[in-house]
Each structure stands twice: as C-alpha cells, then as structure tokens.
C-alpha cells in the first residue's frame, strides 16, 4: 500500500528515513541538507515549542527576535567562536546585485549579534539579569545531514542570559540543563545522562558546555540539548560592562542554551517500531483517533457515525486532543495502519456491537492487537486519561531499561582493559562508562580506534571515588569517570 517501512532491526537508517517520510513529517527540499517540515511534523514541533515556551516564561525568561543576518566581522571578535563555526558558515558577499562592502553571515547561532545589542542595553547592575530567549531558524553548512538530526537549516530556541556574577551565570546554565532534562524525560519519555562536555567537545566560545545525552534504539548516542557557561568571553568581545553596586565597571557574565528540531529525530529513534511512529501521549499532536467501523450496509453507518460524533464531542469537552476519522473509502485495517504510522497513542474503534453495549473499543499504539478492550461510555474519559498516563510512564521505563541494558562499565585497573573496552564499543555499542586521565591525546586516540567520543562527564557517577582507577587508554591515574559512545 505504498507505506512499507524497512525493518528497524535490519536497516535502522532506512527505517528512520521511511518513517519521517511516510508518516508525513518531512519532505526533502531541492537544496541538499534542508528539509520541508510538513504539517504533522510541524505539529510535533509546535507541541515541543509551546511546552518549553511556558517553562521558560514561568522561570523569568522573555522572548525577543534578532536578525538572521550578522556582520561576518562580529564572529571574528571571539577567536574560538569563529574558529569553531568557520567551516559551517554560509557567507553572503553579494546582495541586491552588488558586492557587499562587509560580508554577512546567516546566523549559525546568535551570541554575537545579541551581545552586540547587550552592549547598548546593559549599563548598570540594575539592568541585570537579562534573560532572553528566541525561537528562530539557524543555518549551519553541515557536510553529512539527516532529517531532524542534523540539517543545514534547523529550527531551535536559543537562550542568551547576562548576569552580574559568575556564580549566578553558572547557576542559570545548570538550571536550564536540568529544565531540559526534566522536559525530555517527562514529556518526550527519553531518559538522558546529564553532564559536562570535555574541552575538545565543548561549544566554540564557551568556558564550559553541559549536555543531555540520549541513547537511540541502534545504540548510538545523541546530544539532545546543550547549555553553555560563556564566562566573560562575549562580554569582552563586545565590550559589555556594567556599573556594579560599588560604582565600579565590571564585565557581564553570559550563558547560552538551545534545543532544536533534532528532538523530533530523538523521539522517533527512541520509541518507534516497524509499524511507524510511537509518540508519547504528552507530546502527541493527536492523543486519540476515533475510527468508526463502517459497514457495507449504509443504514447502520449513519448510526455509527452519529454515535462516533457523540464520543468525539465528549472527549473534546474533556480536553483531549482527539480526531474523528470519517474515511468511508478505505477498510478498517487500512485506517488502523494509517493511525499506527502516525503514532497516535490511542485508537477508539466504534462498531455496531459497541453501540449496542453502550461502549467503545480501545487500542493502545504500543501494545499488540490482542490487548484491545471495551470501555463503557460513562467511564471513557477517566479510563483514557489513566491509559495515557500509563503509556507515558511505560514508554519512559522501556527506554530507560534499554539504555541501562546498553550502558556498560569498563573501568581501568589492568593492562588489557582497553582491549575489552574496544570490543565493547565495536561489537555492542551503547554507552560505556570508563575512567579517563583528562588528556586530549587519549581522547583523540580512542576516537580514532573506536569512533567513540566522550559524550559527557556524567553527573550521575561523580560521587564515586577514583582511587586506584587508571585511564582506560594510557593507564595514568584517572581524573574522571566519563561516558563514551558512538553518536549521531
Ligand atoms: P549548539 O549551539 O551547537 O550547542 O547546539 C544546540 C543544540 O542544537 C544541540 O544540542 C543540538 O541538539 C542542536 N543542533 C546542533 N546542530 C544541529 C543541526 N545541524 N541540526 C539540528 N540540530 C542541531
């Protein structure tokens, strides 16, 4: 029927691309690396956006909008920033039929233009803190792209805050990291490890970068969001100073943080199956689809439709995101498959027998077809509410179990531990918690041997004593426990 999806177990990458297209989340654009986000894909983004937007506003952040075009020279003011972003920049040198006197870049991130503005807006301690977020599109000229996970143009939010003290800025960085963790775990049902990036992996221009890292079903890791402590780097580059309470001039401390449409890729890769998407109820644009089981005999159909409309209105009034499938042309089996492909958490089937019993039949997207059950109309709202809550929890627990099963510990004590480590990464993938001396040389060598990078120095394991532990690569004394993985 044209909606054949490759097997996740056999061809994970193809499976993913089949889902994003066949569930009508995206279509490819004429420009390589860009994607058209179609209405259903955009509806998922709108859910992510509205939930996060509320959370930012509840915690004292305001939205604003800064221009897409940034003078190239702004990027050059922060040495590390321009070095890191140069390979990915799209630069405009002609416009309006003329060569530009100063080249412009399409924003790869907005620290520079925002801190240029902050130099005008921040004069005194009374102006601080500034906590601005923007929802925007970003252009990074990526070499290898994949829908949602890594695209040349993507949508995101970027927060940019300014503070009087380093302590306050660091607190904000970690506050947002934790907000991201809670959002991704509670709404997207994706368990994440939180932690600091190494110097090699940190954001270009940051003092330190913190990340949330998730594990996909092919056992590769994905950086799902980042929060950066920028210290005084951008305040110095753009000369942003304020008069402190003692009347002295000080530089302003900065943070920046972002999550993008990549989160939709994570949702797909963590939960979905060979029938299509599986969406956690809290993020699903449609929580319930009502599928009337029409008969060949037209008389009964009118009754079935009327009853279905009553159920639809009842659920709508109870504030569910519900849709009624009025398709009379295709078979029930075809329509069930279409709802499954879209990952709608609950399907309500209504046939003559349901009407006779004053019931409906309820099926859950993540369960097999034998687990369908009938619910009386009086109990429907409360039963569905409960079922959606349980489904949300079960999806999280299933993903957590999977992640825990594929998180191994290979801590350095002895000479041959590195061989075991390599076998583990090469053959089993997943996260490997290991001990590391802190040297970039070891980090680089491990990457060359295994294609695995240090995803983060995870918070979860930092209270473990390091006494006697050695670097998995060089056997020198270990400085950190770190999580390695191959990643997207
Ligand atoms: P960064 O500013 O590099 O820390 O990026 C912030 C977040 O945006 C990252 O944690 C990713 O989740 C996401 N991101 C970065 N590059 C891309 C891309 N090319 N496509 C989609 N999302 C991206």
Image (tube, helix red, strand yellow):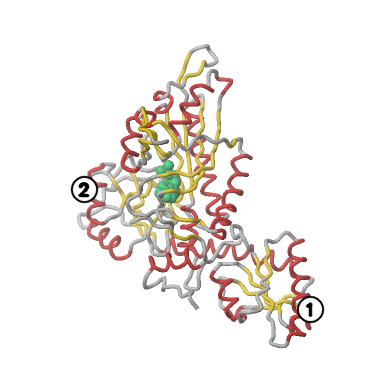
Tally of numbered discs: 2
| Most distant residue in the bottom direction | 297
Looking at the rendered image, the quarter that the C terminus falls into is bottom left
Viewer-side label of 2, 1: 1
Q: Residue at x 77, y 66 (%)?
A: 313
Residue 177's place in the image compared with 122, above or below, is below
Residue at the spot x=42%, y=61% of the render?
216
Q: Is residue 441 left or right of residue 279?
A: left
x, y percent for residue 8: 41, 70
The answer to whether 418 appears left or right of 252 in the picture is left
**Does the closest atom of ligand 1 sit within 8 Å of the Cβ of label 2?**
no
In this view of the protein, can residue 207 be seen by the observer?
no
- Residue hosting label 1: 358
Q: Nearer the viewer, residue 209 or 12?
A: 12
Give the number of the disc on residue 474. Answer: 2
Label 1 secondary element: loop
């Amino acid at each position: 029927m044209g909606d054949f999806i490759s097997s996740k177990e056999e061809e994970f990458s193809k499976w993913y691309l089949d889902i994003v297209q066949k569930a009508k989340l995206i279509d490819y654009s004429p420009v390589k690396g860009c994607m058209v986000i179609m209405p259903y894909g955009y509806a998922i983004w709108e859910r992510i956006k509205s939930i996060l937007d509320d959370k930012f506003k509840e915690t004292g952040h305001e939205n604003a909008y800064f221009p897409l075009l940034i003078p190239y020279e702004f990027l050059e003011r922060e040495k590390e920033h321009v070095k890191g972003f140069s390979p990915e920049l799209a630069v405009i040198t002609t416009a309006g039929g003329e060569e530009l006197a100063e080249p412009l870049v399409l924003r790869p991130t907005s620290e520079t233009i925002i801190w240029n503005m902050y130099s005008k807006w921040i004069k005194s301690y009374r102006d601080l803190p500034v906590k601005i977020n923007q929802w925007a599109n970003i252009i990074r000229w990526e070499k290898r792209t994949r829908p949602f996970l890594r695209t040349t143009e993507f949508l995101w939010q970027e927060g940019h805050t300014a503070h009087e003290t380093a302590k306050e800025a660091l607190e904000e960085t970690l506050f947002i990291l934790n907000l991201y963790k809670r959002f991704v775990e509670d709404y997207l049902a994706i368990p994440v490890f939180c932690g600091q990036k190494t110097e090699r992996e940190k954001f270009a221009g940051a003092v330190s970068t913190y990340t949330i890292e998730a594990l996909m079903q092919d056992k590769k890791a994905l950086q799902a969001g980042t929060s950066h402590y920028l210290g005084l780097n951008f305040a110095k580059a753009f000369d942003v100073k304020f008069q402190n309470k003692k009347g002295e001039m000080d530089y302003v401390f900065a943070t920046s943080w972002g999550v993008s449409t990549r989160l939709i890729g994570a949702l797909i890769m963590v939960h979905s199956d060979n029938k299509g998407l599986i969406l956690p109820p809290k993020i699903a644009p449609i929580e319930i689809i009502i599928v009337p089981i029409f008969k060949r005999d037209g008389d009964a159909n009118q009754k079935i439709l009327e009853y279905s409309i009553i159920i639809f209105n009842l659920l709508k009034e109870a504030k569910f995101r519900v849709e009624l499938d009025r398709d009379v042309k295709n078979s029930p089996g075809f329509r069930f498959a279409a709802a499954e492909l879209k990952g709608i958490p609950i399907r309500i089937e209504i046939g003559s027998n349901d009407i006779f019993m004053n019931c409906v039949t309820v099926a859950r997207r993540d369960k097999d077809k034998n687990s369908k059950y009938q619910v009386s109309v009086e109990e429907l709202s409360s039963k569905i509410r409960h079922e959606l809550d349980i489904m949300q929890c079960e999806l999280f627990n299933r993903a957590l179990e999977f992640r825990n099963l594929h998180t191994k510990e290979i801590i350095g004590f002895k000479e041959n531990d590195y061989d075991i480590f390599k076998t583990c990464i090469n053959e089993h993938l997943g996260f490997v918690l290991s001990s590391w001396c802190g040297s970039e040389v070891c980090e680089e060598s491990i990457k060359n041997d295994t294609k695995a990078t240090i995803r983060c120095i995870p918070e979860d394991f930092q209270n473990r004593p390091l006494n006697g532990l050695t670097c998995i690569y060089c056997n020198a004394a270990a400085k950190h426990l770190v999580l390695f993985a191959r990643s997207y």
